[in-house]
Amino acid sequence: MILVTGGAGFIGSNFVLNWLEKRNESVLVIDALTYAGNLENLKSVENNKGFSFQQADINDQTVIENLLSKNRPRAIIHFAAESHVDRSILGPEAFIQTNINGTFRLLSCSLRYFESLTAAEKSEFRFLHVSTDEVYGSLEPEDPPFSETTPYAPNSPYSASKAASDHLVRAWHHTHGLPVLTTNCSNNYGPFQFPEKLIPLTIANALQGKALPIYGNGLNIRDWLYVVDHCEGIAAVLASGQPGEVYNIGGWNEMTNIDIVRTICRLLDAKSPQTAKAAGGRHENLIQFVKDRPGHDKRYAINATKIFNTLGWKPKETFESGIHKTIDWYLANNDWVQHVQSGDYKNWINKQYASRSA
Ligand code: NAD
Ligand code: TYD
């Protein structure tokens, strides 16, 4: 079996659903169920014999050690993290706790568990650390995309905490021989993404007739990848990646934020004519340019040549096909959106956007 941390979040839950659909191997999810963790994401597999769930914090070493020795996974896929840049600006503490301390504690438990394995089990074991392209900093328009050898230059509390966790993972390999794999991926989008990130926020707000906030001039660039493609990239690295190696995963799809939002509006005009009408004919009328994010990275772009050349992975979805699937999922899952928008979500939106008037 494999153990997945953060498997009730956006990418983790997509990974678990995709894994159980395509592979004949059990999954144990451990997740602290923070605001971003949602068991509804895993509802379709709750009765699957190969699926089990344990609510736990990766900082709780006693619980993690017990889970490892009891379940004896052949791999740990580490997604658990605080993941939203804007939250890391307003409240960095949780990012240090989970992304740095939590990864350290998980590595410590994993190493102790690894050392208890037989030689044959050791040769199979992998610790796969899921990270981000944001650790490489920000690109100028003419710069080449990030490769695995681009020096680290994180700019936000989020990316700094992920960079720290990447370094810890690297050190546990070099010093202690833990067979680690690290993936650094570009921006994901798709089903089950919490509507605090650009794409699901835009879809949810447009359907609710709310403003579509664009930071600064909207010309910041991200490299967007459909989440299931990311999950398949991780599975490819787990299956055939070399321990100690880093693999960049990206969509070969750089787009400005304003183009992303306009594309979503255009597609929603056709898919949801009644909300377009309510917005004065076009969802684009809801766009509002607001105060920029402090330290806003200009451009991210991934060179995903290594993972293609060595493991044969490349994205299957184009942005066009992926964004259609994503919008259709949000249109069909309004209950999910309503549930995650109740309670604490409102407090976040007030705190985050009140001081950002147009
Ligand atoms: P998410 O915020 O949607 O989910 C994070 C999950 O981790 C949640 O289920 C949460 O409950 C859980 N969690 C948080 N703190 C925990 C703790 N202390 N112990 C146990 N569980 C805890 O995040 P996501 O977007 O799914 O990202 C998953 C991973 O992928 C993160 O490591 C992130 O840095 C990385 N990543 C994300 C993107 C992206 O575009 N979203 C891109 C590249 C890499
Ligand atoms: P986000 O989805 O938060 O991901 P990240 O910051 O990790 O790249 O943001 C994507 C881009 O969209 C980023 O340049 C910030 C911008 N953005 C907005 O313009 N408005 C918003 O309301 C949000 C949440 C993000």
Image (cartoon, rainbow, N blue to C red):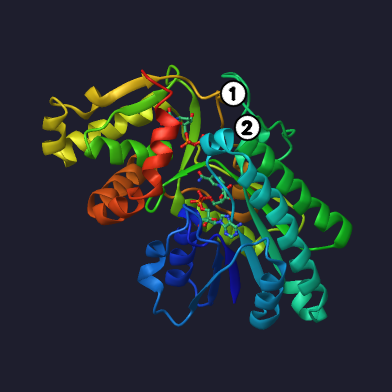
Look at the numbered disc 1 and give the secondary structure of its residue: loop
Asked if disc 2 and disc 1 are in contact, CB closer than 8 Å, the reply is yes
The location of residue 206, given as percent across then percent down, is 25, 35
The location of residue 230, given as percent across then percent down, is 51, 51
Look at the numbered disc 2 and give the secondary structure of its residue: loop
Identify the image quadrant of the C terminus: top left
| Residue type pointed to by label 1 | Gly
x 23%, y 49%: residue: 331
x 68%, y 60%: residue: 59
Crowding at dot 1, Cα within 10 Å, few <14 / some 14-19 / many 20+, comes out as few
Q: Is mark 1 within 8 Å of ligand 2?
A: no
Front one among 140 and 130: 130
Identify the image quadrant of the N terminus: bottom right
Can you see residue 115?
Answer: yes
Can you see residue 242?
Answer: no
The residue where tag 1 is placed is 295
Front one among 314 and 332: 332
